[in-house]
Image (spheres, grey):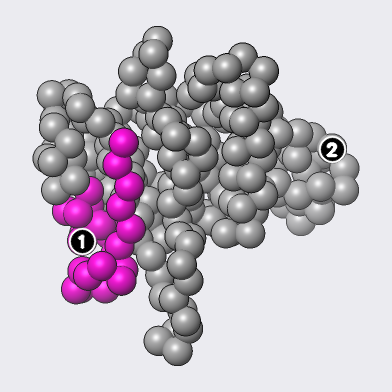
Amino acid sequence: MARRYDSRTTIFSPEGRLYQVEYAMEAISHAGTSCGILAVDGIVLAAEKKTISKLLEPGTSSEKMYKVDNHIACAVAGITADANILVNNARLQAQRYLYAYQEPIPVEQLVQQLCDLKQGYTQYGGLRPFGVSFLYAGWDDKYGYQLYQSDPSGNYGGWKATAIGANNQAAQSILRADYKPEISLKEAMNLAIKILSKTMDSTTLNSGKLEFAYL
């Protein structure tokens, strides 16, 4: 039944599902795990960096962590090329706001603008959804430290701690058990390491397999 309705993002199935969006989310579930943890004095983003081959020359830029503005960073899981397009768009939106109003863009406003773009790619013919999920870590004067997650459908939400990518259900189980509201930045880093050690395929952890960012 699904094959009759999964050729385009603009076609609903009789069950009310958009299969292309679900397939995009499935692609993300095969990517390396990324997690974000909100602490009382900051935010930690951590991600598994998958090395395709030992012969590959390591790049100078990150494939999992991006700086959007001086007060916003993000971690991604999914198709890196799609992430680059969205991150460049987010950087442009942030600089336009700074130029127009002479102050940094509020975190949620930037997340909402990016999710509006992602939602548009699920509604118009000839387009495919972006195969990437984001974790946004930011700070502004009104709400302080904030952590958001978005998916290919354009939905987003604020979180205290969450995970995306492969084994995200196992990661979220650990977060539910071990996260506490008064957690410090150092404790959040230790919890992130614990999560990645439990969810990664590799048994040994080193700097070549992990990426961290904190705000």
Task: Tell me the quarter of the picture where residue 155 sits.
Answer: top right
Q: Secondary structure at mark 1?
A: helix
**15 displayed left or right of 171:** right
Closer-to-camera residue (19/101): 101
Residue 209: give x, y in percent of width and height. 31, 68
Which residue is nearer to you in this view: 155 or 36?
A: 36
Callout 2, which amino acid? Tyr
Tell me the residue at 20%/61% (across/down).
197
Q: Is residue 173 left or right of residue 61?
A: left
> Alpha carbon of mark 1 to alpha carbon of mark 2: how far?
40 Å
Q: Which residue is denoted by mark 1 in the rendering?
A: 197
Amino acid type shown at disc 1: Ser
Quadrant of the rendered image containing residue 43: top left
CA neighbours of label 1 inside 10 A, class few (<14), some (14 to 19), many (20+): some
The residue located at (60%, 38%) in the rendering is 91
Nearest the eye: 182 or 124: 182
Image check: 123 left or right of 65?
right
In the rendered image, residue 112, in percent from the top left (x then y), is placed at: 59, 24
Could you tell me if residue 35 is visible in this image?
yes
Instruction: Please give the residue where the numbered disc 2 appears in the rendered image.
Output: 124
Query: Is 214 a magenta residue?
Result: yes
Residue range of the region highlighted in magenta in the rendering: 191-215
Q: Which mark is residue 140?
A: none
Picture quarter containing residue 154? top right
Q: Percent position (x, y) of residue 19?
A: 69, 47
Q: Residue at x 22, y 48 (%)?
A: 192
Q: Residue at 53% across / 56% down in the picture?
A: 78
Instruction: Give percent across and percent down for residue 60.
Output: 46, 67
How many circles with numbers are drawn on the protein?
A: 2
